[in-house]
């Protein structure tokens, strides 16, 4: 937030925004005078908080579409230049997190100035969207035996284990394994972010 406040005219992009509660909260503490808040969600929402963002003195834009169909590069090409782009999201389920990360991938180097995403529903990830398959390919042999390879079926079985973490009926050891799977999925994403965007 402090870095973003130093860049006049940043764009905050909230993926899977819903009512844009996160954007509303961020805008309440934002000192970047010319910041713009973009909410992306495929559903129409009642009681949206877009008005609160505007009441805080910022431009608020909403795009009703699926994250998979949103082209951030094209969208930015139709707007005045921005100092930097900051991606934010909370409870971004499964592959939606990876689709959001991919949306930033084609921006100019250094244009992404921040990313903060609260992930969930790791069991819904798939090989079509997950951004760090090479990392998981290295992990599977250590977890599942030397012959284990990443394929859609193996990956699906792997990510489904993450649901053990939130299931009170399973044994303690299984729950611990579920948390480890969640961590590995997100660690792969973190390594992807560091490599592609040079963010820490």
Image (cartoon, rainbow, N blue to C red):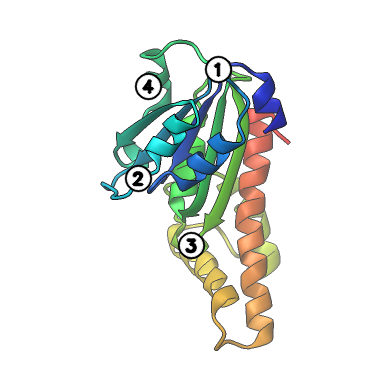
Task: Find numbered disc 3 in the image and state the secondary structure of the residue it sits on.
Answer: loop
Whole-angstrom CA distance, mark 1 to mark 3, is: 33 Å
Label 1 sits on residue: 9
Whole-angstrom CA distance, mark 2 to mark 1, is: 23 Å
**Residue beneath the point at 40% across and 43% down:** 49
Question: Closer to the N terminus: mark 1 or mark 3?
Answer: 1
Label 3 sits on residue: 121
**Residue beneath the point at 42% across and 48% down:** 128
Q: Residue furthest front?
A: 55
Check residue 48 in the rendering and tell me which mark sits there, or answer none. Answer: 2
Name the quarter where the C terminus is drawn.
top right
Question: Closer to the N terminus: mark 2 or mark 3?
Answer: 2
Whole-angstrom CA distance, mark 4 to mark 3, is: 28 Å
Left or right side of 55 for 187: right
Whole-angstrom CA distance, mark 2 to mark 3, is: 24 Å
Label 4 sits on residue: 75
Q: Is residue 100 visible?
A: yes
Q: Residues within 10 Å of mark 2 (few under 14, many from 20)?
A: some
Whole-angstrom CA distance, mark 4 to mark 2, is: 22 Å
Name the quarter where the N terminus is drawn.
top right
């Amino acid at each position: 937030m402090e870095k973003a406040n130093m860049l006049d005219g940043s764009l905050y992009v909230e993926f899977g925004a819903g009512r844009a509660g996160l954007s509303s909260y961020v805008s309440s503490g934002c000192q970047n005078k010319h910041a713009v808040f973009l909410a992306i969600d495929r559903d129409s929402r009642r009681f949206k908080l877009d008005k609160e963002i505007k009441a805080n003195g910022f431009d608020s834009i909403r795009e009703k579409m699926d994250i998979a169909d949103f082209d951030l590069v094209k969208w930015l090409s139709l707007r005045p230049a921005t100092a930097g782009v900051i991606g934010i999201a909370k409870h971004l389920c499964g592959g939606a997190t990876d689709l959001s990360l991919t949306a930033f991938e084609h921006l100019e180097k250094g244009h992404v100035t921040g990313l903060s995403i609260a992930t969930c529903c790791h069991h819904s990830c798939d090989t079509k969207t997950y951004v760090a398959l090479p990392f998981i390919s290295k992990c599977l042999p250590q977890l599942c035996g030397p012959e284990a390879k990443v394929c859609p079926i193996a990956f699906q079985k792997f990510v489904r284990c993450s649901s053990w973490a939130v299931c009170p009926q399973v044994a303690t050891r299984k729950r611990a394994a579920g948390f480890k799977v969640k961590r590995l999925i997100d660690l792969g994403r973190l390594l992807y972010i560091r490599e592609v965007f040079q963010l820490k």
